[in-house]
Amino acid sequence: MIKLCYDVNDYRRQICDVISEDDTVIELGCHTGNTSKVILENNVKLIAIDNSPEAKSEMDKLDLTFINADVRLHDTLSEVFKSVQKCDILAIDLGGGYHPDTVFKVFYIWSSTFKPKHTIIRNRGLVEFYNSISEVNGDYKSQDGFLDSYKDSGIPPQIKEFDLWTPMPKK
């Protein structure tokens, strides 16, 4: 199941709603660990990734595997894949409101690699896009945490558009 929201409390609740004991959770965009702490209230294996300078000192205080790296980079994906080839839950919160295209591309490469049972994405742009759709043609729907069209794709190649990514939109 793929869930999408913007409110951080809804995001955390949705993650907790799908967690089972001994799940493996990959959290992309953990920042200083506020959501990580909520996830760790459950008996799970948590791998948290973030490249912000504030993250490392806070994440080192928690009982999890922390990787201080950019989730857009193929090397980061490969590093995580070497330690765990599958996850039960993929949680994505890359800035909450910015860069829906980047968030979707990150979802694509991580979910098609790890094939999670559940993906929870927090991003205002994607929620706004979803809520603005007036008509959908075609009966495509996945019951998993990844898109069915990626089922047999393996690890996707590095997406070149990530080189164009900027930290915040210019006003």
Image: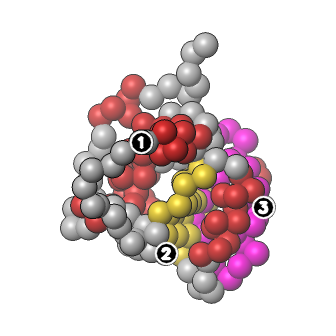
- Name the residue type under label 1: Ser
Percent position of residue 72, x then y: 43, 43
- Name the residue type under label 3: Lys
Report the coloring of the rendering. Answer: secondary structure
Q: Residue at x 62, y 86 (%)?
A: 21
Element on which disc 3 rests: loop
**Nearer to the camera, 54 or 18:** 18
Disc 1 and disc 3: Cα gap in Å? 46 Å
Q: State the residue position of label 3.
A: 61
Q: Is residue 64 above or below residue 51?
A: below
The quarter of the displayed image where residue 164 is located: top left
- Looking at this rendering, what residue extends furthest in the left direction? 152
**Nearer to the camera, 40 or 125:** 125
Q: Is residue 43 left or right of residue 170?
A: right
Q: Earlier in the sequence, mark 1 or mark 3?
A: 3
Residue range highlighted in magenta:
28-56
Percent position of residue 162, x then y: 38, 34
Residue 134 is tagged as: 1
Q: Residue at x 55, y 55 (%)?
A: 4
Q: Is residue 20 above or below residue 94?
A: below
Q: Earlier in the sequence, mark 2 or mark 3?
A: 3
Q: Are marks 2 and 3 in contact (CB under 8 Å)?
A: no
Q: Residue at x 33, y 49 (%)?
A: 136
Q: Badge 2, how many Cα within 10 Å: few under 14, some, many 20+?
A: many
Percent position of residue 8, x then y: 71, 51
Whether residue 91 is visible: yes
Q: State the residue position of label 2.
A: 88
**Nearer to the camera, 143 or 35:** 143
